[in-house]
Structures are given as C-alpha cells and as structure tokens.
Amino acid sequence: MRSQHSDAIILRHTPYGEADLVVSFFTPGHGVLKGFARNARRSRKRFGPALELFAQTVMHWTERRRGELLELKEAELVNLRSGLRGNLEALAFAGYGVEVSEELAVAGGDQGAEYRLLKAYLDHLHLHGASRAARLLLELRLLQLSGTIPHLLHCAECYTVFREGEVAFEAARGGSLCSACASRFSELSVHVTTLGSLSRCLQTRLELFEGFSLSAQTLDEGLRMTASALAPHFSRPLRSLAFLAEIEGGGDAGERL
C-alpha cells in the first residue's frame, strides 16, 4: 500500500464504533478524500485535535483497494482555528463555506485554487469573525473557478452593456438581462452599481478577504444572485444553509465599493 501525505482541511468526521472516525478532508492535489481513522478518539499521539472540524492539518494515509476508504495513519495539527469555536455566527459561516466548497469540488485531480480559497476564507473567519461580505466573495470566486460565473455588466443574450438603473437577473439564462431580453417573470432585479461592485470583487486576489466595504444593497442583491447561480450545482439541500439562516444577523452596512 502506497503511503501519501498532504496539507488538508478537515471537512467532517463521523464516529464509527467505540473509538474510530470516518473523516472527510480537502486537499490541494486530490480534492475531497475520505478515510478511516482507527482508534482516533483514543489515540492522542497519532491524531489528537488534528481531526477537529475546520482544522488545518498535514494528513498521512495509505491507499487501500479501489473504492475503499483510505487508511489514515497520522494527522499533524497546523492550525486548529480556535477562533471559530467561541463564535456561533463564525462557526455557521465556516460550516457553510466547507459544505458549498465540497459540493463544487471536482472529484480527484488538482484543486489547488479551490483549496487556497477555502483556507483563506476559514482563516478570515477565525481571525475576524463572520461577515456577509466574506460569504459573497467566497461564492463569487467559487462560481468563477467552476467556470459558471454569470454575465454581470452586459446582457447575457444580446451583450448590451449596462450603464445605469435596474436590470433583470436570471441565472438559468446566463445572468444579467437587458429590458428587451428579460421576461416578465425574471427572478431578480438588481442595480447596475451592484453589478459593478461584484465585477470589481472578481478582479481581486483569490485569497483576499480583508478591506472590502460593500453597501447593504450590494450584499443583499449579490447574495440573492449567487444563491440563484449556485443552486443548480447542489446535489442536495445544504444543511448548513438552514443553520446559517437561523443565526445570521442583518449584515454589514459598510460603504459602497
């Protein structure tokens, strides 16, 4: 059996029997993996707190037969991100970020950019607490990395460039729509200033979450847009969304970007 190791983010763990854990973790080179950690709840030496949710670790494993869980041998703790533990809102945002990233992750292969994005998002929540701006940035960047970012500053069908006012938005038709192309039943109406702010956000560094000031209107409209664009990617309802909806406050007022 070939031994491997990788930087990893712990996505979830499930108790198995009296002392074992089944662990899902995200790696930059292999995407989402799942392994069996034998005696993990008793062995402080091999695993300790390194299998806690959202922890940054170096995971060691061996491959078993195709289709079987990996055999987890050891996990070295790099960052527990303890700042998430005492902040319920940050914990909810972290749970959502992990779940939505896992849903959009491609099975196997290089996931380096997606991994760096999730790592930076969790680090930001750990250090600065929850913010709707961070969630919006994560969602926009995940859509961009998946190649499904909606058209923003021009009509998705006729490519008319928007200058001012409100425009329709239909994710199923590619994004923003001019008045001539929009249907009477367009799901959303968003202001051009929101579209401009989102477009500028997409031009920033992938791991950057600090220094953004977005208006309440941009946050409200932007999050509705990304929710609509992300929905087709989900194989199931996200449990973290229900929890997030329960505890999420009124959001950030901020200044316009």
Image (cartoon, grey):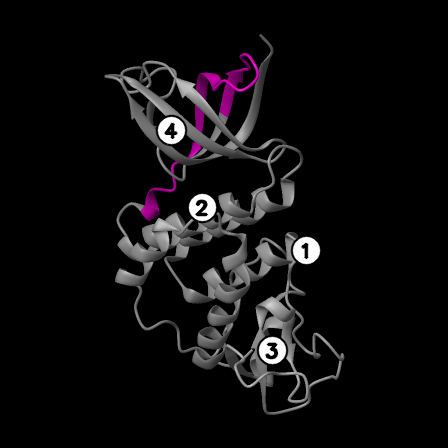
Dot 3 alpha-carbon crowd within 10 angstroms: few under 14, some 14 to 19, many 20 or more: many
Q: Which residues are magenta?
A: 59-84
- Tell us which disc is closer to us: 3 or 4: 3
Q: Nearer the viewer, residue 52 or 18?
A: 18
Q: Amino acid at mark 2?
A: Val
| Among numbered discs 1 and 2, the one appearing first in the sequence | 2
Q: Position of residue 152 (x, y in %)?
A: 65, 74
Q: Position of residue 131 (x, y in %)?
A: 40, 63
| Label pair 1/2, CB-CB below 8 angstroms | no
> Distance between the Cα atoms at labels 3 and 2?
26 Å
> Distance between the Cα atoms at labels 3 and 1?
18 Å
- Residue 181 visible, this angle: yes
Q: Which residue is mark 3?
A: 195
| Residue 197 left/right relative to 251 | right
| Among numbered discs 3 and 1, the one appearing first in the sequence | 1
Q: Which residue is mark 4?
A: 51
Which quadrant, please, contains the C terminus? bottom right
Q: Which residue reaches farthest bottom? A: 165
